[in-house]
Amino acid sequence: MSSQEARALAKAQAEDIERLFQATATRGDRFADTVAKTVGSWKFIGWQSSMLALWILWNSLSATARFHFDQPPFIALNLLLSFQAAYTAPFIMMSQNRSGTKDRAYAESDFETNVSAATEIEEMHDHLDALVETVHLRTVTVQHLETLLERVARLEEQNTRLLAEMAYLRSNSERQT
């Protein structure tokens, strides 16, 4: 498998996990994710800081004295922020639990991919070892064949000499007779 194919497979697995989590998300899950995403943003921090500053200024300035609805030490503001924290924290925790479950699914997918890759690598090593052994055997076989060819060539030379000697001996024995 090429690296592009591996990346495409990993991307497809991640998309499958994301689709599964989106398909199984309840309305409460989606609401908790939205709250966590909103409260955990710089935009929200800026908005809330502006609102708090406006609240404090409105209730502190002498120019707005007759419209003050929360005198320092700002008991109503404290109560409002306590309510916000009391309700926001569980939504964030629900979203984090869901995110943790999704992360575990991604980790399991990664683990399965890693096990599969390790198995493929091991199989490739086995094939490579078999090829090395085959190449070694072929090298040894070629060496044996070269040795045999050298011996055959020597035997042919010996045979040629022996035939020449036999022909010489025959011709000598025919002359003597």
Image (cartoon, rainbow, N blue to C red):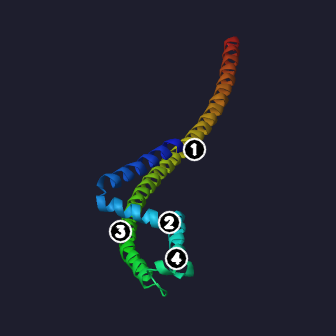
Q: Crowding at label 1, few (<14), some or many (≥20) Cα neighbours within 10 Å?
A: few
Question: Are dots 2 and 4 in contact, CB under 8 Å?
Answer: no
For the residues marked 2 and 4, what is the alpha-carbon distance in whole angstroms?
A: 21 Å
- Earlier residue among tags 2 and 1: 2
* Quadrant where the C terminus is found in the figure: top right
- Earlier residue among tags 3 and 2: 2
Percent position of residue 64, x then y: 52, 77
Front residue (pair 129, 86):
86
Using residue 111 as the reference point, say whether residue 50 is left or right of it. Answer: right
Name the residue type under label 2. Phe
Give the foreground label among 1 and 4: 4
Name the residue type under label 4. Trp
Using residue 117 as the reference point, say whether residue 87 is left or right of it. Answer: left
- Residue 55 shows up from this direction: yes
Q: Quadrant of residue 165?
A: top right
Front residue (pair 37, 126):
37
* Residue drawn where x is 70% and y is 16% of the image: 172
- Earlier residue among tags 2 and 4: 2
Could you say which disc has been placed on residue 94 in the image? 3
Using residue 124 as the reference point, say whether residue 23 is left or right of it. Answer: left
In this view, 94 is above or below 152: below
| Residue holding disc 2 | 44
For the residues marked 2 and 1, what is the alpha-carbon distance in whole angstroms?
A: 70 Å
- Earlier residue among tags 1 and 4: 4
In this view, 84 is above or below 75: above
Q: Secondary structure at mark 3?
A: helix
Front residue (pair 112, 24):
24
For the residues marked 3 and 2, what is the alpha-carbon distance in whole angstroms?
A: 19 Å
Percent position of residue 69, x then y: 43, 80
Q: Secondary structure at mark 4?
A: helix
Q: Secondary structure at mark 2?
A: helix
| Residue holding disc 1 | 136
